[in-house]
Image (tube, rainbow, N blue to C red):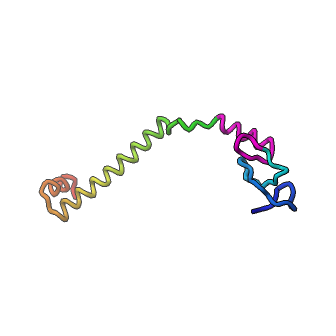
């Protein structure tokens, strides 16, 4: 393990939950089950936790983007299947379908 950020001659016992700096037992500040190096890091963590909303999804535009990506992927897979069915298996329906698209 590393040495304390405030006391370079003392072995660190923990890392700050916010900035990840190593701290010794004398410098450790505890808030709940977390350890911190300073009051500022405790405040930063509290501010982050107050604004963090894990229950929120990707939002409306994120959902549309995911749907578009999925549809483009599905279209590509279907096109590959159609080409394989026409060129390799020589299935008339797919051969005619590719002819309509000029392939």
Residue 46 in the image: x percent, y percent? Answer: 71, 37
* Residue at the left extreme of this rendering: 92
Q: Is residue 100 left or right of residue 8?
A: left
Identified at 38% across, 47% down, the residue is 70
Residue 13 % position (x, y)? 77, 56
- Residue toward you, 26 or 87: 26
Is the C terminus in the top left, top right, bottom left or bottom right quadrant? bottom left
Quadrant of residue 5 in the image?
bottom right
How many numbered badges does the structure rendering display? Answer: 0
Rendered position, 50 above or below 66:
above
26 in magenta: no
Nearer the observer, 86 or 19 = 19
Q: Is residue 65 left or right of residue 33?
A: left
Q: Residue at x 27, y 58 (%)?
A: 80
Q: Residue furthest bottom?
A: 88
Task: Look at the image and give the residue range highlighted in magenta.
Answer: 30-50
Which residue is located at x 40 percent, y 47 percent?
69
Q: Which residue sits at x=44%, y=42%?
A: 65
Residue 100 appears at what percent x and percent y?
18, 52
Residue 1 location (% of width, % of height): 75, 62
């Amino acid at each position: 393990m590393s040495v304390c950020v405030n006391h370079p001659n003392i072995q660190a016992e923990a890392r700050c939950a916010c900035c990840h700096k190593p701290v010794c037992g004398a410098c450790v500040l505890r808030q709940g089950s977390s350890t911190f190096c300073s009051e500022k890091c405790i405040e930063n963590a509290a501010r982050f936790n107050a604004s963090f909303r894990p229950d929120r999804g990707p939002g409306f535009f994120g959902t549309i983007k995911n749907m578009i990506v999925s549809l483009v992927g599905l279209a590509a897979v279907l096109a590959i299947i159609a080409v394989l069915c026409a060129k390799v298996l020589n299935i008339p329906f797919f051969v005619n379908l590719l002819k309509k698209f000029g392939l």
